[in-house]
Amino acid sequence: MRIDVFTIFPEVVEGYCAASLLGRARRDGHLDLRVRDLREATDDARRTVDDAPFGGGAGMVLMAEPVFGAIEAVEASDGLARPLLLLTPGGRPFTQEVAAELAGVEGFSLLCGRYEGVDQRVADHLVDGELSIGDYVLGGGEAAALVVIEAVTRLVPGALGNDQSANEESFADGLLEYPQYTRPAEFRGWAVPEVLRSGDHAKVARWRRARALARTLERRPDLIVARGGLSTEEVRLLAEAGEVHLLAEHGYDS
Ligand code: 6GU
């Protein structure tokens, strides 16, 4: 997986991507990450990349010229991994589904927005799409780029070192994760649920499924709706798990 990142804070992106999962994926050759300085194509002494907005208003706008310059220079020398995606709060919502989509391509590039915005000609004539990581505003796209890079990289076959965990986890089937426990079996008087220590794998699987369903229904009913509501079998599983009240709250007869 090749990812090119364009940013005015290359050291911030490099710093995070050297550590943990991403650092290992890079060393093992699963991730070819190239961080580029947006100031590279500037020729003035102050390396200017921003200017005041036409029409007035607060803040500064990332200029078209240095952005086109930096990206076209890379495109001409090393080639650019496409699609090129602009990170901006107005972009397409980045979800696990989008992460899976990107994990399936050979590479892509990220352009970190900054300041109050990016000259619209960059969005109109340079990038292939726009992504947002959620409904809140960050000072720039760097933290969003790291979110995208990490979410995608851990779906690249081999990059996790354990291909099972990416499939079994939260959101792979549209549900939140079931609770996990590790030793000791009792901590400060709080015991691990007995079923998890029973050794009965079918029973453990049913318990986990019920906990994932109940947790999702309680915290994120929108996710249950998105997957078409609970099936008869799922309603029965939750009823058997004692979640009659929760079911009723969400309009299910058990
Ligand atoms: Cl991608 N950029 C910025 N600046 N803020 C955001 C965002 C991106 N996603 C959510 N908020």
Image (tube, grey):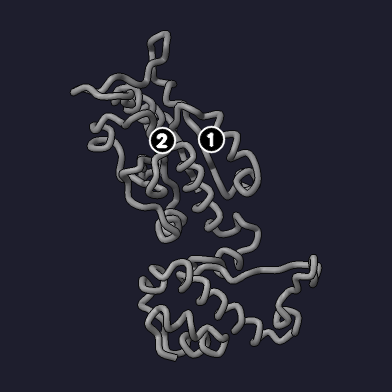
The quadrant of the picture occupied by the C terminus is bottom left
Mark 2 = which residue? Answer: 112
Ligand 1 picture quarter = top left
User: Are the residues flagged by discs 2 and 1 in contact, CB closer than 8 Å?
Assistant: yes
Q: Is label 2's Cβ within 8 Å of ligand 1?
A: yes
Out of 30 and 35, give the one closest to the viewer.
Answer: 35
Q: Position of residue 186 (x, y in %)?
A: 80, 71
Up/down of 197 relative to 4, above or below: below
Q: Quadrant of residue 230?
A: bottom left
> Element type at marker 1?
helix
**Label 2 Cα neighbours within 10 Å, binned few <14 / some 14-19 / many ≥20:** many
> Element type at marker 2?
strand
In the rendered image, the residue lying farthest to the top is 45
Residue 119 lies left or right of residue 84; in this view the side is left
Residue at the spot x=51%, y=68% of the render? Answer: 176
Mark 1 = which residue? Answer: 13
In the rendered image, the residue lying farthest to the left is 55
Q: So how many labels did they put on this image?
A: 2
Q: Position of residue 70 (x, y in %)?
A: 38, 26
Residue at the spot x=34%, y=21% of the render? Answer: 50
Q: Position of residue 195 (x, y in %)?
A: 70, 83
| Kind of residue at disc 1 | Val
| Kind of residue at disc 2 | Cys
Q: Is label 1's Cβ within 8 Å of ligand 1?
A: no
Residue at the spot x=37%, y=44% of the render? Answer: 82
Whole-angstrom CA distance, mark 2 to mark 1, is: 10 Å
**Label 1 Cα neighbours within 10 Å, binned few <14 / some 14-19 / many ≥20:** many
Q: Position of residue 88 (x, y in %)?
A: 35, 40
